[in-house]
Image: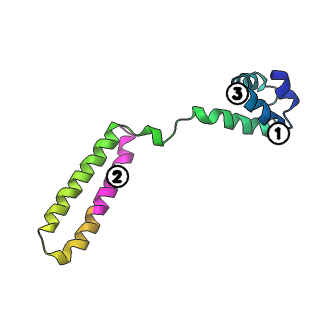
């Protein structure tokens, strides 16, 4: 596989076929020849493609404190909306706007603070 990768480094179609034929062998062979073909554009493309699965995804990084903040924000918003319903109906849209602002701003305000924790 190593020899085939070096041979087809300037032929993207052949490299794609090699990759689909045996992905594991292609990845290991690619790592072995990386020092010899590092200056080519296709090497940088394949390196990014093969290493993409190794990078953590932002969506997967939701953790328990984020969920707790979200649930507490929803509860606070629900309580505030319930209190607003008891007041005069003509002021309801103004209160809802402020409540939604607080609910969406609360996690944004806390996110920079969590970096230092």
Front-lying residue, 38 or 93? 93
What residue is at 32 percent from the left and 39 percent from the top? 65
Task: Point out the residue furthest to the right here.
Answer: 7
Tell me the chief SS of the magenta region: helix
Asked whether residue 49 is drawn in magenta, I would say no
Front-lying residue, 116 or 41? 41
Task: Point out the residue furthest to the left here.
Answer: 86
Q: Is residue 101 left or right of residue 13?
A: left
- Quadrant of the rendered structure where residue 9 is? top right
What residue is at 33 percent from the left and 48 percent from the top? 110
| Rendered image: mark on residue 23 | 3
Q: CA distance from mark 2 to mark 3?
A: 44 Å
SS state under label 2: helix
First in residue order: circle 2 vs circle 3 = 3
Could you classify mark 1 by the number of other residues whose Cα lies within 10 Å: few (under 14), some (14-19), or many (20 or more)?
Answer: few
**Residue labelled with disc 1:** 13
What span is in magenta?
100-117
- Quadrant of the rendered structure where residue 30 is? top right
Could you classify mark 3 by the number of other residues whose Cα lies within 10 Å: few (under 14), some (14-19), or many (20 or more)?
Answer: some
**Residue labelled with disc 2:** 109
Looking at the picture, how far across and down is residue 11, in whole percent?
A: 86, 38
Could you classify mark 2 by the number of other residues whose Cα lies within 10 Å: few (under 14), some (14-19), or many (20 or more)?
Answer: few
């Amino acid at each position: 596989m190593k020899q085939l990768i070096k041979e087809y480094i300037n032929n993207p179609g052949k490299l794609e076929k090699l990759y689909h034929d045996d992905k594991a062998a292609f990845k290991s062979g690619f790592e072995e020849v990386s020092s010899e073909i590092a200056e080519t554009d296709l090497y940088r493309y394949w390196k990014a493609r093969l290493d993409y699965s190794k990078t953590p995804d932002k969506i997967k990084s939701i953790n328990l404190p984020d969920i707790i903040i979200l649930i507490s924000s929803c509860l606070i918003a629900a309580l505030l909306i319930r209190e607003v319903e008891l007041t005069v109906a003509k002021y309801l849209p103004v209160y809802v706007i402020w409540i939604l602002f607080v609910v969406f701003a609360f996690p944004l305000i806390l996110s920079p603070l969590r970096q230092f924790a």
